[in-house]
Amino acid sequence: MPSSANARTSDPVKALTHARRRSDSAAEPPKIQDWTLSPTGKLSGDPAGSLALGMAPAGALNGSEEAQAEAAELFRAFIEPIINPERYADLHRQYPQRRALVEHLAESHHKSARTVYRLLDCYQKKGITGLIRRLRSDKGQPKALNTASVNFIIAAVLPKAGSYGELSIADVFRLHEEERRWREQRASKPLSQAERVLYAGYVDAEGRLLPSAQLSKAAYSTFWRQAAKIPELVKLMARRGQDAYRNAELISFRDYESIQPLDYVVMDHRMLDTFSLVRDGDRWKLARVWLTAAIDMRTRKWLGWCIVETPSSDSIATVLKQVFVRHGLPKSLYWDNGKDFRCHWLEGARERSRTAEAIDGLPKQWTGVLETLDIRVHHAIVKNARAKLIEPSFGRVADFDRTLPEYCGNRPGTRPERFEAELLKEHEAWLAGKRDRTPFRTIEQIAALYNMELEGLNERELHGEGMRKVTPTGYGWMCPNECWENLISRVERRTIPEDVLQLCFAKRRELTVRNGEVPVTFAGRQYHYRLAGNPMALLGLNGRKVDLAYDPLDLEKAAVYFESRFIGLADCVALRHMGEEDFVQDARDRRAARREIKHLIGTIHTAVPVPDPETHLRRRAAVTPPRIEPARVEVPAQLPAPIAEAAAAQAAEAEFSFAATEPSIQAIERAPDADADVEFNFFSDRGD
């Protein structure tokens, strides 16, 4: 019986398999160590190897056409005759044993049997790819540069913030030579503490540079070829930053044809590249106004927009109301991550994408308009403008900006020369009273201008996915309105009453009803609101507090609430002008209101009897039961002595009576005076 060793070698295929495994394990290069952090916080390891492992394609398959053709020829010459006896029946009848067949094939193609067995083994393990000639394990690795030099070149090519900027290959070559000489001089000397921290991955325990830290000397062309091997994406990130890197990274492409209109409505703000006049108290000021807009993701149709001085949740609410009233409620909204989009008023307290629960009734406290309306909200990836479809659509608006005389560019470097040389000087002359008009439009005029432009964009052909159509002459492109008309009929219209919509989006202010109106002041201007369809309805609430729900950017209509009950929608009444028919109508309304009130009072007095005071008091006395004071024990109160004496004196005085007293009058006769005259003389100078 043959020994185990002979048994292992009796099968050439198995023997070659074991030999192949031993040779592969012996020839396998050591694994490259990835970047790590040293105890001092510095990067150590092999940056060159890390870049190769992280950026190079997976595997080391030889993809040249020559190598693939050679592998196909080896398969047809050696492998197929062995594994396909049906096709090569004559050959298998002539050589029924595999060893004889292998030796015949080897001799026919001037190869050894060992080579044929090796090819068969590679095919059985890896298939046809096992027959492709392998690449050298050191292919692409520089022979004139050691690992330290390669790492130095990679680090120098990539700018380091706060240390050095973008260096040319010539700069890297000179810097490498200086560093090489410095390391040679410091090879046997211990480094300082600061240098040990800097060269943490290249020093030994005693602080001296390791032999592997020495740089190799090479030609300039070698440096150029090594720097060219650094992936462009890595150099782009290091040199230009993340914004430039995003233009070269992986891009996700959406399938727009798989969605329907109003599945996603995309919203965002854009500052216009024009200056306009906006109110600043009693004066005008120049400002770049903003466009808040919504676009349908499927058809690219502009659904709603507004021009404002400063974008906010108010402008977002205005655009959303336009979309909801004109086109119905969408399924989802896709917008930015700004505070105005994530505000509690729109989304509620939870800032995440979610589907609201079924709406059974209006909640007591509003926790977000969109949650109330059962509209899902999606937020775009932070700092990724490409994620929002509306961003490239804003480019078409920017093209219109350039056609206006007030165009100022998107930054000072792109500002036209005539803007400051002519337009600003003309505007300053207008402010000084030296010109009759200014070259700049007001924000209202700009809004009217962009209204027409955005309506025109909806009628203009748009090239993009899902916008192609078939024409008699070939393929063409649809405009957003045409695409909308073709697809919107498949989508049901989710509607909401206008008064409920006003309730959802309006902000509130508590006010007092005066003269049948709700007066309010916005931005120093007085507004008067009367109920639509019945201007006199609020007369019954004169002097009462009501809530006015309004849209700060659309003050033409508001909602009135009294004691949390919806009263109705109110229209903003324009100021009256002398000679207008509105004055006559107001007088008619006043007279009608007086007649109605008088008629109401008379009807109430006739229909509802109310007794007069005499009848009321008489009826009260008739039904009032008699009251008897209950008997109680009387106890005299103790009074102070002066009060008791005064009371006694008062009682005695009250008992005194002149009738009960007899008068005692006595007549006393006077003795006659001898000297007195018998008769009285009025003019006598005597005392009597």
Image: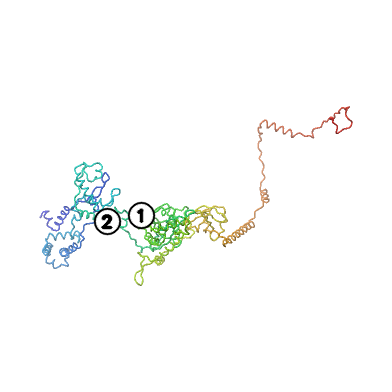
Tell me which amino acid carries mark 1: Lys
Q: Which quadrant holds the C terminus?
A: top right
Is 91 rendered above or below residue 286?
below
Residue 647's spot in the image, x, y percent?
A: 70, 33
Q: Front-most of 479 and 496?
A: 479
Residue 420 at x, y = what percent?
Answer: 40, 57
Residue 654 sits above or below residue 67 on the image: above
Three-letter amino acid code of the residue under disc 2: Glu
Name the mark on residue 383. Answer: 1
C-alpha separation, residue under disc 1 versus residue under disc 2 = 22 Å
Residue 361 seen from this side: no
Closer to us: 300 or 221? 221
Please, is residue 192 above or below residue 458 in the view? above
SS for dot 2 = helix
In contact (CB < 8 Å): disc 1 and disc 2: no
Asked if residue 382 lies left or right of residue 345, the reply is left
- Tag 1's secondary structure? loop
* Depth order, front residue of 482/330: 482
